[in-house]
Image (tube, rainbow, N blue to C red):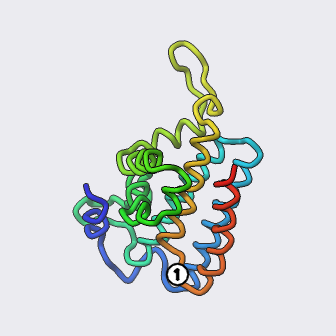
Amino acid sequence: MDVIALIESLKRSDENLIQGSIELDKAIDHIVQLIRDTCSLYSCGSFASSAFFSITACEEVAKAHIGLFTDGNNPAQKGRNFFRDHNTKHKMAALPTVPMGDRLGDALGERQLQRIMKLAQNSGFVKCRENSLYFQRQSGILIVPKEKVDKKFARALALFAIEVFDDALVGLTNHSFEVGEITDSLFEAVKNT
């Protein structure tokens, strides 16, 4: 399902996930902390954990962005709340506007940017999320997350998460502009590694 059609399918109600600018700012602060944690983990070489936090930040951005307008329930699929579905949140985070600016494409290169967008839109983030968190047996060998997630991929995910945040939430409140300066600084720090 196309991400815009998915968003349009969600039920509108008076019980939206986020109700008002105070709650939005509270969610924004939570997301910025996830982004800070992502960057801290990246800078200390914990690339798999950084990747996990990057994907989690993208999920939370989608919830905050769309949660202003809905409670996440889809009436066509009784009892299903899209805010509890990782794959759906990944699709909602990777809006077509994310790669429109030059900043992310310049930092990652167009090929890597398109790869990350496709991973988010086509269930790839679910596997990336699992690979960054869980050890597993593969072809008779125990594989740990640090063997699955390298510095380059963790960097790309961190920059992507920051851009997703900037694209979806910066500008919605005065507070979002203030913390947007923090995430812009983090973007530059990670970009230059």
- Residue type at numbered disc 1: Gly
Query: Which residue occupies 35% across, 46% down?
Result: 122
Query: Which residue occupies 61% across, 48% down?
Result: 155
Where is residue 21 shown, x and y percent of the image? 54, 85
Is 18 located above or below residue 137 in the figure? below
In-front residue for pair 187/9: 187
User: In the shown orientation, is residue 117 left or right of residue 143?
Assistant: left
User: In the shown orientation, is residue 78 left or right of residue 124?
Assistant: left
Please tell me whether mark 1 sits on a helix, a strand or a loop.
loop
Is 129 located above or below residue 188 in the figure? above
Query: Which residue occupies 70% across, 58% down?
Result: 189
Is 32 located above or below residue 77 in the figure? below
In-front residue for pair 33/167: 167
Question: Which residue matches tag 1?
Answer: 171
Where is residue 25 shown, x and y percent of the image? 59, 79
Where is residue 188 shown, x and y percent of the image? 66, 61
Q: Quadrant of residue 136?
A: top right
